[in-house]
Image (spheres, coloured by chain):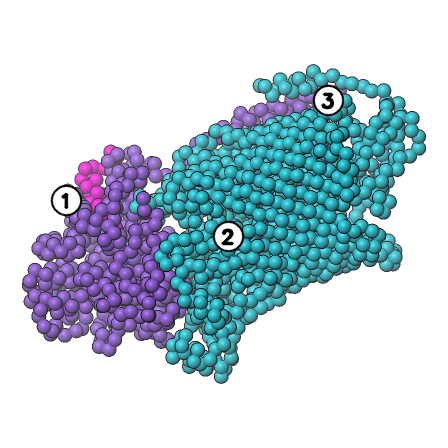
Amino acid sequence: MKNINIKSIASGLLAFSMLFFYSCEFEDQIDPNNPNLQQYNQDATVNELNNIVVGMESGMRNGYTLYVTSTGTIARELYLFNADPRNTEELLGKNGGQLDNNVFYLNGPYNGSYTNVKNANILLNALDNTEFVSDQEANGYRGFANTVIALQELRVLNMLDENGIRIDVADPDNLGPFVSKDAALTHIADLLNTANTQLGNAGAEFPFSLSSGFDGFNTPETFAQFNRALAARVAIYREEWAAVPGFLEDSFFDLNGDLTVGPKHSFSTASGDLLNGLFKIPGNNGDMIVVHDRLTQGEDTLDLRVIRKMAKRENAASQDDLNGDYETALYPSPTSPVDIIRNEELVLISAEAKLQSGDIAGAIADLDIIRNSAGLDPYSGVETTAAVTDELLEQRQYSLWCEGHTMVDLRRYGRLNADNLPIDREGDQVFSQFPVPLTELD
Amino acid sequence: MKKQYLLMIILFLMGTYSYAQDRVIEGTVVSASDGLPLIGATVVKKGSTSGATTDLDGRFKLEISEPEILVVSFIGFAQKEVAVNPDQTGDLNISLEEDITKLNEVVVSGLASSVKRSNLGNAVATVSAEELTGMTNQPTMDNALYGKVTGVNITSSSGAPGGGIAMRLRGVTSITGNNQPLFIIDGVYVSNAEIPSGLRNASGANSGNEENASNRIADLAPSDIENIEVLKGPSAAAIYGARANAGVVIITTKRGKRGETRVNLTQDVGFSTIQRKVGIGQRNWTPALVGETFGPDEVARYNAALNGRGLVDYEEEIYGETGLITDTKISATGGSEKTKFYVGASLRDEEGIIKNTGYTRASVRANIDHQLTDRIKFTTSSNFVNSTTQRGFTGNENEGGLSVGYNMAFTRPWANLYPDEFGNYPDNPNAAGNMLLVRDQALNDEVINRYIQGASIDISLYETDQSFLKFKWNGGFDTYNLETYVYVPEYHQAQRGLQNGFIGVGKNSIFNTNNQGFLVWDNYLSGGSVQLTSQVGYTYITFDRDLVYNQATQLIPGQTTLGQSGTQEFDQTLQNVREFGFFAQQEVNYEDKIIGTLGIRADKSTLNAEQNQFYYFPKASIALNLANFDFWNLDLFNQFKLRAAYGETGSSATFGSLYTSFQAVNIGGSPGVSVGGLRGSENLIPETASEFETGIDVTLLENKLSFTATYYNRNISDLILQRALQPSSGFGLEVTNLADLQNQGLELALNASPVQNENFVWTSTTNFWFNRSNVTRLDVPPFAPAGSGFGLGLGTAFIEEGQPVTQLKGTIDGEVVTVGDAEPDFQTSFLNNFTIFKNFDFSFLIHVKQGGSNLNLTTYLTDLAGLTGDLDDPSGIERTSNPNTDRFIEDASYMRLREIALYYRLPESAVSVFNGAVNKIKIGASGRNLWTITPYTGYDPEVSAKGGAGLSTGLDVNPFPSTKQVYVHLALEF
């Protein structure tokens, strides 16, 4: 009796085990937490495409804060005093040290920019493989995407400069080579032109919407004005002075208009959104953007831009043998938007193009618009190219303080060096560009 | 189908034999030292499976028909063989000697079989309850192992009460995956996860592993443990297949014993204090020095402080508390012939050395064994744990103003952080947060409710004198809810105007199950001289995690719940893993002279790209007991064993490695998608480790001295790397099989009992071990693994072909060079127990780690702040004038008195005053980590700022300082 019982138990157990064995066929795994990239390769829907557009607008802010503070530190327009000491050591070349090629202040802006380029390339690829959008709508997406790529690549190039950048990055397994600075600038200019053409064939409305940061620039026509403004910026980098007026003409440039007009990066406290990392709590310690003292000496403090953008601290800030009396007040709140490009810069671009084309009087007239807005008297210095160039860079410095321009501007005019910038501590150095990231090397 | 045939053969083709059983012999088994009966000792006819176990009086009965040799064994005692013949009359009195060499101890050899240590082909370390917790009170199981087992390296990612330990067996086995062993408690695969609380979203720490979360093996009450077996590498752990690359730790909890019910009550009371302070802010301040360091304005503040409160030693203020520890344990064991039980409860309450930190663990356990019929045995093991932790804020951060260590590093001694008469805390003038405010008013709490249930059934299917067939099933589940709660008030200086208060609430559910079934067939051939043990079986494992994290900022002042806020964020991560495997193993034992094992395990997992492909993990081992051969005539040796073993194991990629996914982003309230950092790999295979191990075990001088030496060579191939991609591709990381790694090492252990007499017993264990690693293949250029450091400038782990995987690279004069190696040169430990005049027990454990570098970035920060104590000394001047990475590298060697204890067992005469209400009384005092010699200048050379996973050792960034503890103990047995 017992034996039979045991046998049936055994057979039962074994049958159970065998059943188990055969029922253990695992299904294909899909990511339970996130959408899969693959689904954009074929027949992406308008909703899916628009999700990437939102992702791209959001992604334009990737690494922007570090871009501004890192280039700004090198250009001695600001210090970042926070928990990471490398902001005051490596970026200022303390004790003869060098810039790291595998570090947050480089990788952050670099990777952030190329992540967004990837988003754009996914969008472009999806457009080639879907039938859910018309040609006209596709042009709208493409014009948007190519403009964003150009802006992102320009930011990387501004950091790496003579090291050049990669421009052919659509296939992650076959990245193109690093191209020279000139080739990269040409590519960026061409890309902006391509985008401008596409925007011209995109009808009256985009099939997607943008955040409030692009209010006034959210149709193909008005977005193209933003595109042309960027083209003007690239043109002065390329010293194609003659092309500048045409680009300005097609942009939102307005000598008599509101200097603050322009598209913006917006920020909000919405779930998943970012806060403006360049906002710092007034009077805080331990995390400060401190104005370099060279900008706040004597009469400078009467400049409305200094009064508006910079605030005198109750206790002077000091860290790592660096000191500053003023801190940033550029953004009043953590949700304040950041200008991508605004009329004020376009007026300065206009002045620069005129100056470089020999129209010194025209340049001074443009600069006086800026001076006037800053509560300063009209320009009264000598009217030589050299003197007005000094004046131009001075005005750019204050108008575009803490916006990622000063390093590029000083470099363009050969002034990004110890002869033209103060050395705060013995042994500090002025770097002119960032190295190629370690992980980018072949 | 094949299996079914096999069973048929087993069931029907085997004949049954019957013997003339005409004599019953009886006897008693006693302990040689005190003559007390041994209950549950086994008496088996040599070369067969038939035998008896002793009853409550130590007595046994056995039928024999011809002259036999009886093999008498009992755990903890040397095995003895006694010749008997049927004509014999009268009682046999068999006395067993205590065994210090553990030769007779039973060790797991397969998933469903075990083998005597003397026959083992591997080096398997076993730690008994006495060794684990007998000396001093142990806060967590993993911590208790250090120094007691060769080949183990432990680092602490936090000195906070409640755990935070990383354990490595025989070096690093994975670069991105888990380097921590698989933990199995009573047959249940248990989670040892570190689940972050999300406080990085307030502190600005770089990733979850910088949050210093506790590891969940801390939930296991060490007092419940009967013994721990450590399978250090694939040669021993191959049968655990795809989860065993980092070794396996098999924990067996205490079970009931037949006999009178015994109740044990122990009460420990202890005090915890900081091991050492590093002297932050302790320079010889003068107005001149203050002015020179911080500028002229600071002198006025310095003078104001001198005229007021004076200078404050904030290190003392924050870390200077004495934490009270109470640990109460009560357990009852007993049982009848059929049913045995162990029930235990413990309550541990531990205060940290930072005010408002602490840990409370309440644990209840019930282990029941029941003999259903002669042939069916059933066991169940249940454990419920409730623990609450106040972790405090320590470690790395970025501008959050929360980590007390990080902010202390910048806080000058004349800064006033104390609250005013209205309870308002001033802002820290030197750092992003006021440590006193954080300590007193911010919260970082964890609550765990955990239930672990295991069960097993043994069915004896078929049994003769020469063979038996057994079916065994065991399985269980481990489930817990981990709730985390982080709160930073809105008036904290880094919150005002930004997040305006922060609440992070984690609700994490974990549900793991495993079950396995086996058929085990034992068979004796050639008159018992050859023993064959065969087993086949399957394993099915599931892991389900649902991690929900909710965050609120822009808080309504004073409010502490999620809804009372302007901004909320939600995040949910699901991780479901299924694994299935089967295995087969054959063991052969020829007269305890030659013992061989062959086995194979096959596993598939949803973590692999080919989720239905089986990966095979073979093993083989052989042990030669030379002293058992007839030609061996050196009586000096009780055992002389040569052994060799080979095995393979695997480790799959972490969840999510296969997917190339978008992540959700947002701008202005509109949801969107953006490329995530990770590029998934479509042909990811598990990393596999193959290990060859060989060794020698020698026991001599009547078991008074034993020596074990083991050499191993482990090659891990297709190592899974999280490789940084060229970021212009749009992806930051890719998970791929790209490298091979070799670990080689030597482990020596010497056990001795030099003196054993009535009034003095001395036993001593000396361990020595080291490991060397070498990256033998790397298909990509050398690189710094993501998250293993803070960039080359500050030093980082660096994967490079031909170099140790633990090397640290940094920059010297702009060149990338090796600046250190986290791997110790060697470690050695020295454990001694003395029993003096029968009633006094004195023991101590000294542990030495020689070599191994740490990156002391705590000092780096205080240097920057101008607050390191030695800045005016030559060492500080030299350090601060060096711009290169090597200035942070420090030798992390140490010699530590890890445990020391003295106990007194009251003599029977004293105990008898309780009229039998109490059987035994023991009192004692002990200490942990009381004394350390080290050149390291940080808090503790055992440190890891980045948690337990990956290449995290040796990074020192303002940790929760390690503590030392003293205890008094009282133990009563009823």
Q: Amino acid at mark 2?
A: Ala
**Chain A pictured colour:** purple
| Chain under numbered label 3 | B
Q: Position of residue B695 (x, y in %)?
A: 63, 38
For disc 3, the neighbor class at 10 Å (few under 14, some 14 to 19, many from 20) is: some
In the displayed structure, would residue A313 be above or below residue B385? Answer: below
Q: Secondary structure at mark 1?
A: helix
Name the residue beneath numbered marker 3. Answer: B525
* Residue sitting at x 39%, y 56%: B811
In the displayed structure, would residue B767 be above or below residue B236? Answer: below
| Chain under numbered label 2 | B
Instruction: Please state which of residues A134 and A9 is positioned toward the viewer in this rendering.
Output: A9
Query: Is any part of residue B293 visible from this angle?
Result: yes
| Chain under numbered label 1 | A
Chain-order first, disc 3 or disc 2: 3
In the displayed structure, would residue B543 be above or below residue B199? Answer: above
Q: Position of residue A226 (x, y in %)?
A: 18, 53
How far apart in space, not on screen, are marks 1 and 3 (Cα)? 89 Å
Query: Is any part of residue B576 visible from this angle?
Result: no
Q: Secondary structure at mark 2?
A: loop
Q: Which mark is residue A197?
A: 1
Give the farthest residue toward the bottom. Answer: B307
Residue range of the region highlighted in magenta in the rendering: A130-153
Q: Which secondary structure dominates the residues rendered in magenta? A: helix
